[in-house]
Amino acid sequence: MDLFDDLPEPTQSSGPGSAPSPTTKEEEEEEEEETRLKRKRDDEDSPSEDKQKEEEERGQIKKVCKEGLPVLRGYVAARRGERDEMQDAHVMLPDLSVLLTSPLPGNVSRVSYFAVFDGHGGSRASRFAAEHLHHNLAKKFPSGDVENVDKLIKKCLLDTFRQTDEDFLKKASSQKPAWKDGSTATCVLVVDDTVYVANLGDSRALLCRTEAAADGGRRPVTLALSKEHNPTIYEERMRIQRAGGTVRDGRVLGVLEVSRSIGDGQYKRCGVISTPDLRRCQLSANDRFIILACDGLFKVFSADEAVKFVLHVLQEGSAERRSGLMEDELRFESACQQLASEAVRRGCADNVTVILLSIGC
């Protein structure tokens, strides 16, 4: 079984007209085995010369990767809608490495973190997750010389969500009366040019990628970076029922709309869990931006509509000039603000929080 649900990745010879192509685990293992045997044969022929050459190549590759990493810029917009309280929270940390307790692994140059939390039953769970989840992640992030970074990042993310949920539930149960807040969590962790997405609940992450069109040009496509968790999904409903819970009117016990969350202590015995779904995606030169937003946006926008709205603002919209910001940055900021405002204008009464993450060279 793969560690992550991988999204399509660009082929090695990706040019303007190349299409994304998924790589199976079997193919990867075959390639690794062929590479290992070739290196063994080469070492037997000329160990000292090839070892020196390999070290030089590794150094060059690391240098190229570090200098050629995609430039990430985050923009955020938050609207209360018609709610009495703003129960959403968000975090944007373009450089998470400043919080790490140990040095980055030798083959990693950059770690960035962006997250949206949508609270329900109050704002305490979402605020707690926004304040603590990335600190737990920083403490558990792999360090030193490691071989399988993917496996360690998966474990790090799973442990981080479990720890954050346990810490909040402990604090919530100690209150008089006990807190009953809960929160979704959708987190984007960018390690060099690889995106890892961990999510609970019904907030979403989307990627806008361009691909070759029939007319020889390029067209945008929308890729889902996250999976929604609600009790109407078969696997989620079965887990809840096996735990002794029920699903009525599409809700856990007829009340809770999501089947995975941080907090919601009163529903944990009913099969509501804090184990996130994990997805991994390799960024390419064909990627434009990532939208990270709570369900308030998607109550009035489909995924494709949200992407097209942002593209329209980027291509056609005008942005007021501000000192210190380039034209491209102004357009992305404007697109983010307009997307959140349009959701409210379309009648979304819920809180709306949008993070727009631009991907550039």
Image (spheres, grey):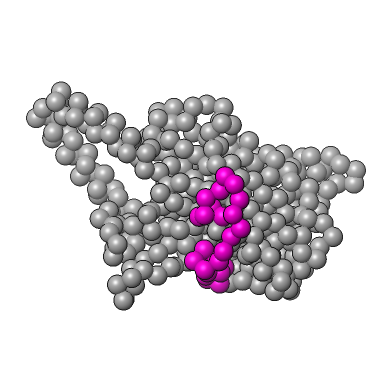
Q: Residue furthest left?
A: 45
**In the image, is residue 138 above or below residue 213?**
above
Q: Residue at x 52, y 54 (%)?
A: 327
Q: Is residue 291 left or right of residue 36?
A: right
Q: Residue at x 58, y 60 (%)?
A: 319
Magenta residue check for 287: no
Q: Determine the image quadrant of residue 248.
A: bottom right
In this picture, which residue range is highlighted in magenta? Answer: 303-330
Q: Nearer the viewer, residue 243 or 6?
A: 6
- Residue 220: percent from left, percent from top: 43, 68
Q: Residue furthest top?
A: 48
- Residue 193: percent from left, percent from top: 42, 46
- Residue 119: percent from left, percent from top: 74, 55
Q: Is residue 57 left or right of residue 249?
A: left
Magenta stretch, overall SS: helix
Q: Determine the image quadrant of residue 259.
A: bottom right
Count of numbered marks:
0
Q: Residue furthest bottom?
A: 215
**In the image, is residue 150 above or below residue 243?**
above
Q: Is residue 82 left or right of residue 258?
A: right
Q: Nearer the viewer, residue 273 or 15?
A: 15
Magenta residue check for 306: yes
The answer to whether residue 244 is visible is no
Q: Residue at x 55, y 66 (%)?
A: 317
- Residue 246: percent from left, percent from top: 72, 66
